[in-house]
Image (cartoon, coloured by chain):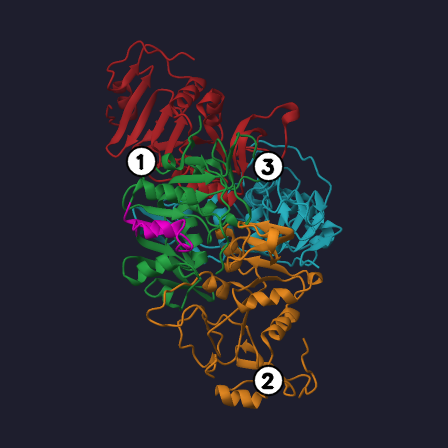
Chain colours: A green, B cyan, C red, D orange
Amino acid sequence: MSRTLVLDTADEAVAGIEDGSTVLISGFGLAGMPFDLIDALIRQGAKDLTIVSNNAGNGEIGLAALLKAGRVRKVICSFPRQADSYVFDGLYRAGKLALEVVPQGTLAERLRAAGAGIGAFFCPTGVGTPLAEGKETRVLGDRTYVLEYPIAGDVALIGAFKGDTLGNLVYRKTARNFGPVMATAARTVVVQVNEVVPTGSLDPEAVITPGIYVDRLVAVPARRYIVEGA
Amino acid sequence: MSRTLVLDTADEAVAGIEDGSTVLISGFGLAGMPFDLIDALIRQGAKDLTIVSNNAGNGEIGLAALLKAGRVRKVICSFPRQADSYVFDGLYRAGKLALEVVPQGTLAERLRAAGAGIGAFFCPTGVGTPLAEGKETRVLGDRTYVLEYPIAGDVALIGAFKGDTLGNLVYRKTARNFGPVMATAARTVVVQVNEVVPTGSLDPEAVITPGIYVDRLVAVPARRYIVEGA
Amino acid sequence: MAVNNSSPKDHSATIEHTGRGPLTADELAALIARNIPAGSYVNLGIGQPTRVADHLHPSSGIVLHTENGMLGMGPAAAGGQVDPDLINAGKLPVTELPGAAYFHHADSFAMMRGGHLDVCVLGAFQVSVTGDLANWHTGERDAIPAVGGAMDLAIGAKDVYVMMTLFTKDGAPKVVPACTYPLTGVRCVTRIYTDLAVLDVTPHGLVARETFGASIAELQARLNITMDTP
Amino acid sequence: MAVNNSSPKDHSATIEHTGRGPLTADELAALIARNIPAGSYVNLGIGQPTRVADHLHPSSGIVLHTENGMLGMGPAAAGGQVDPDLINAGKLPVTELPGAAYFHHADSFAMMRGGHLDVCVLGAFQVSVTGDLANWHTGERDAIPAVGGAMDLAIGAKDVYVMMTLFTKDGAPKVVPACTYPLTGVRCVTRIYTDLAVLDVTPHGLVARETFGASIAELQARLNITMDTP
């Protein structure tokens, strides 16, 4: 009896996500994006969401579809501007979407801090730039740092490769990206994998996200999404 | 032509370590301790060392042998007191060894901070205890945190399982412990492994310490050390 | 294992098992094991708390964490199972269960500090009525300080159970108005399991859940502390 | 690729290749590739810097980092090699070389922020004489801000090379006394590679290493900046 629930459908996996939630969504561009969970979230209907993700959607699939459905109030990301991010662009320019841009490594570290119980950290990235304006700074040694705070999610939606019935996860190549840190940083962690395997079939030395971080797991068919450019 | 040097002997691997260096030594008890590198360091002769390690040696082998040889000025660790840590005990009680006790997780996180370019971090561990006395504190949300600073090494001596000729490392079971963080936190990282394997023979998904962190690598025969109690 | 339920005073209030003696260490371990919710992720501290593992049923799906880098720790290793690379936090050889995962020290303590463990069970010298914990140092001036992971565990788990005798061998109370020994953590203990009583630490003070071989009235008098009933 | 070395002015000072035209983008990429020390760990930014990879010889042992979680990145993927889970920071499909390693975003940016990369090569809108970098935002009020990993790269690598044309298409200098565009990083650039000159950023100001199709005197006049010679 694992604490991790292995569910049959993406719809069950996203059940109960509340309006106004902060939702962490894994992926770098399309790699590692939990398409099926996002589609299920659109069906589920939660609105006024704050989305934390590296990008702000491509074309009209995945995160872009969620934006297009009008469910998102704010996006916290490092790089919203992509060749095919027209859904985000339109909503942003129309003033329908708030945006917080965070340097990519700071975004990852703030998520890690939330998962690791760190209250705040002094970070050298962005010092002296517009993204550090108004933030507390401190000189430590010969370097100036800016104080950064954790970003925690109510929910994380994560795309991984395989999971066992205890919730242990492995990822695949650069689709790993934000999944492991986001899995540590949300109260409820929902993961889609291509395959749920029996417990004991993953190499304990190669588990990337231990099952302790995974609340809900669902297998979905692998999807060969299209690779985009920057 | 890798930046990582694969050397023939532990003596070559520890060459050039200077008096007064801060040396990070991996291991939790005996698991993961780089015995051969420590023995070579004793032969090499560097003195006035500050050692950062979870424990302070067992019996008269490994770190205890280095202490016994009189080369250590200060130990930074979480748990110096063990059933068979009589070498440390004697030197400490004789006033020949300075000691800084750091909670185990804070020790790991301070090492990580050094490796990750974090200037300092607010940590909830130890607040209100003697180990936080005199340290800066801050209330963030509903919790009090103490400000902790990075611990960087001049050198790290690490015991791992296998390494490839690029310096990529894998560890074995709980002998992994402090190795991966220490490998990020020192200017010169020296690693002993049981086997150096050709580049391309480790699973890229399961590499724990990428070769970028490893300066010197040496294969030594596996040693079946004796397990101790707490 | 036979807890005498013959004389419960009130079903909704404290259960006073006065018709029997105090719990043995083994009975106490079994009681704790029964009270840990199925599917929990649990860390058992060094010493007495380790005994709790002997009473956990595999069907409970409880997963054990050891802070030296493992989830899915199995029972103590014996004979040919002994592997020096596979030890617990007490540095004793253990085994690996299916679904285990290994990780390094920074990740292990991030898991702990980040509040991902459901329960940890710790020994103690003293616990205060507000849940302050003293379990790492007796305050003797010539003692070698050694904290290990105690402070991290104390502030990390969602529920911190203390397992100890209620009185020292000399008869001094170990539940006290305020700790006189150096603290491990402030307001961190949520429940106190002792041979004579199980006490919850609540915002309103101590609440006695069960007593063994003594009445609440007797214990209040011996401890000189007021307890509430559920 | 033919750099005209016919008119070096002084072997120990600036080499003025005045008997030829400015470098093409490809010649510039080749020059940078030649100047990166063998065995270096290198991150090539999105856009022009990606071209440097085409000129790296496998025998150099240079290992490429991509901030979305990989060391040992190989050339662009083509045809059947394309794997949507294996992309570079520009989100284009790439390949994996023997000895590759994958890691998550927090680890990837810890590697960067912690100063473990030897070189990164970035494009730029402007670089100041003190090494300030502006490469993420043109300052237009209606532009969608998108920083990605630019700020992390700028402050992270040991050497930050900028690769750009020395003047805009409109003839405006891109090496300037002080950046007018929003900054990416302060005093972070160590060397500026342009079509017309290679400039080192030193504590004493800019030092011209080589010029192409122009003399130092001409460039100083056009830029209205004083340069030193090596």
- Whether callout 3 and callout 2 share a subunit is answered no
- Residue A20 in the image: state x and y as whole percent: 28, 46
Mark 1: which amino acid? Answer: Ala
Farthest residue in the front direction?
Answer: D79
Whether label 1 touches label 2, CB < 8 Å: no
B61 to the left or right of C138: right
**Residue under label 1:** C178
Chain for disc number 3: B
**Identity of the residue drawn at 33% across and 69% down:** D142
Query: Is any atom of residue C126 visible in this view?
Result: yes
- Distance in Å between CA atoms under marks 1 and 2: 71 Å
Query: Is any atom of residue A117 visible in this view?
Result: no
SS category of the residue bearing label 2: loop
Query: Residue A164 versus residue B37: which sits nearer the camera?
Result: A164
The quarter of the picture where the N terminus of chain A appears is top left
**Residue under label 2:** D229
- Residue D14 in the image: state x and y as whole percent: 63, 84
Mark 2: which amino acid? Answer: Thr
Q: Is residue C138 above or below residue A106?
A: above
Q: Which quadrant of the structure image shows residue B203?
A: top right
**Identity of the residue drawn at 57% across and 58% down:** D65
Chain for disc number 1: C
Say few, some or many: other residues with alpha carbon within 10 Å of mark 3 (under 14 / 14 to 19 / 20 or more): many
**Residue under label 3:** B173
